[in-house]
Amino acid sequence: MAASAHVDTFTTDNLPPPEQWPDLLLDLPELRYPEVLNCAEHLLAGTDADRSCLISNGETWTYGQTRATVDRIAHVLVDDLGIVPGNRVLLRGPNNAWYAAAWLAVAKAGGVVVATMPLYRATELRAIIAKGRIAVALCDHRYVEELTAADTGLDVVTWGGPEPDDLTRRIATKAARFDAVRTAADDPCLIAFTSGTTGQAKGCVHLHRDILAIADTFSRHLIKPRPDDVFTGSPPLAFTFGLGQLLIFPLRIGATALLLEDGSPPSLAEAIVTHDATVVGTAPTAYRALLDVDGWDPTSLRRCVSAGETLPRPTFDAFHERTGVRLIDGIGATEMLHIFISAADDDIRPGATGVPVPGYEARVVDDDSRPVTDGQVGHLAVRGPTGCRYLADPRQADYVHDGWNVTGDAYVRDEDGYFWYQARTDDMIISSGYNIAGPEVEAALLAHPDVAEAGVVGVPDADRGEVVTAYVVVRRGVGGTEALAGQLQDHVKATIAPYKYPRRVEFVDELPRTQTGKVQRFKLRDRA
C-alpha cells in the first residue's frame, strides 16, 4: 500500500475504525489499480486533445482545453489559496464546464472535493462546512449569496462574474501544466454529503480508486460506453448519480459530457436533439415528462439510465413504446457512490431493479443480518469495490453490519436472483429523485411562529414516487387556513432547499405519538 500524499489528514483521521468498514471486493481485473493513483489524472489522460470533452452554455471544450483549464485552476488552488493535499474544497454551482473543471482540479491538486447542490440554503451549507472543516470554496458567482449568508469565514473564489479576482481571470496568468499530486489509490478524494433520517448531514467519504471503480463496473458493463457517445441528463454533479453519469463515465472512455444548467424535461429534450445525445441519465419522473414534450425526437438515444427512485412499470413500458429504448433501472446510494444493482438489454425484467452489477454482491437479510429465503421481504445488503465510510459519524454502525452495507431499502429476491424493490425501511422520503429527511422538514416548519407541532411523511404519488406531506398542529388562536398552508410552504422553501417543501399541508388537532412522545409516522402514512 502506497503512503498517503495527504499533508492535511483530517479526513483520514475521521474515518470509521477499521472494524466498522465494509468488506471491499476488488477481484475483477479492471479493479486492480496501481497503489499510486490520482483519479483526475486518469480521467483526463490518453484522449486526443482535439476531441470534444465538455459542452455547456453553448460552448464546447476539447480535451486539450479542459486539461489546460483544470491545470490552471489547480495552480490557483495551490499557488493563490494555499491548498495542500488533503484540504477540503467546497464547490457550489449548477452543472457546467467550470464546475466540472473545478472538481477535477481539486482532485488533481490532491484536495478533497465537497460538492454541494445549488439549491442548498445557508443553514445546510453551514452544517456541511462545519462538519468538513472547510476553509476554501469555489462558487459560481450567481450562487454566492447563500454561501455568504452562511457566515463561516470561508475563502470564496467565484467564477463567471465581473470581479477582477474571478477564477476565470485568475487562471489567465497560470501555467497550463500542473503535475498531479501522487495520491495513493486509497487517499480520500470526495466527501459526498447526504441527509439521514434525522436531517443531520452525513459525509460519505470516497477514495480515488472508488471514482474509477464506478466507471469500471456499472458504466463498463451496463452502459457499455463508446468514445463517440454524448452523455447528458438532469442530476446535479453534486449528486453522486450525476457525478458518475455526467462526468466520470464519459471522461473515463474519452466521450463527451453535455452539461445542462437547466435539466428540466423540455430543456433536456431540446439538448438531446440539438447535440444528438446518445446516453441519458435522469429520474423516472423526468422520463415520463419527456414523453409529453411536443415534437421531441429521441432517435439519437442509445442508452437511458433511470435512478434516484424506483422505476414504475408503466413508465418503463411507455418510454419503450415511444422510443424503442429499454430504460436501465438501477439502485445506488451516496454511501456506495453509484449504482450496484441493475440490468440492461435482454437481462431487463420490467418491474425488477435487476441483479448485482459485476464487482458487487447483494443479498436480502432479516433484522439480525441473516439471509432470508427467496421471496421473503427483508433488508437489502450489498458489498463491492465501494462502500460506506461516514465522516466522524456514529451512524456508521447502523449502515454496516458484518461487512455488508445495509442500505435501508426493503427488497425481495426471486429464485432467479433478481431484486424487487418494496419500500424504504426508514423515514427518508424519495421524491422526484431527491432524498428528503422528514424530520428536517419538520424542524423548518416548527421554526414558523404559528406551528406548534409537525409530522412529515412521504405519500406515494404516481408522478413523483412520493410527495412530501406535512401534518401540522397550529398554535392556539391560529386558524388552519389555505392561506396559512401557502405561507408554511413558502417558509420551508426559504429555510431549506426548496425541493424539500411539503406539497401537501393538512392541519390536524394532534399528532399520533407513542407513550414516550415519539411521533408515529406510520400512522400518518396510513392516514394519507
Image: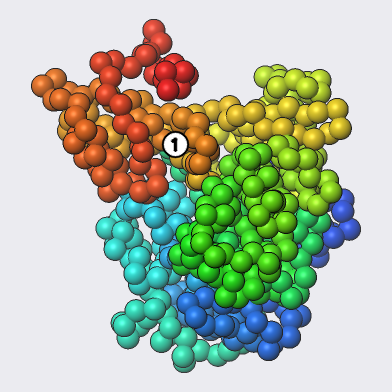
| Front-lying residue, 329 or 35 | 329
Number of on-image labels: 1
Q: Residue at x 35, y 48 (%)?
A: 498
Quadrant housing residue 403? top right
- Measuring from the top left, give residue 107's x and y in whole percent: 60, 68
> Would you place residue 105 above or below residue 391 in this image?
below
Residue named by callout 1: 467
Q: Residue at x 64, y 70 (%)?
A: 277
> Would you place residue 34 above or below residue 519 in this image?
below
> Would you place residue 405 above or below residue 164 in this image?
above
* Location of the C terminus (image quadrant): top left
Q: In what element is the residue under mark 1? A: strand
Quadrant housing residue 467? top left
- Measuring from the top left, give residue 48's x and y in whole percent: 73, 85
User: Farthest residue in the front direction?
Assistant: 295
- Decide: few, some or many residues near mark 1? Use Cα within 10 Å; few <14, some 14-19, many ≥20: many
Asked if residue 498 shows in the view, the reply is yes
Using residue 134 as the reference point, say whether residue 244 is left or right of it. right
Quadrant housing residue 491? top left
| Front-lying residue, 257 or 31 | 257
* Location of the N terminus (image quadrant): bottom right
Q: Residue at x 40, y 76 (%)?
A: 159
- Measuring from the top left, give residue 405's x and y in whole percent: 69, 36
Q: Residue at x 41, y 87 (%)?
A: 169
| Front-lying residue, 315 or 262 | 315
Asked if residue 217 shows in the view, the reply is no
- Measuring from the top left, give residue 142's x and y in whole percent: 34, 69
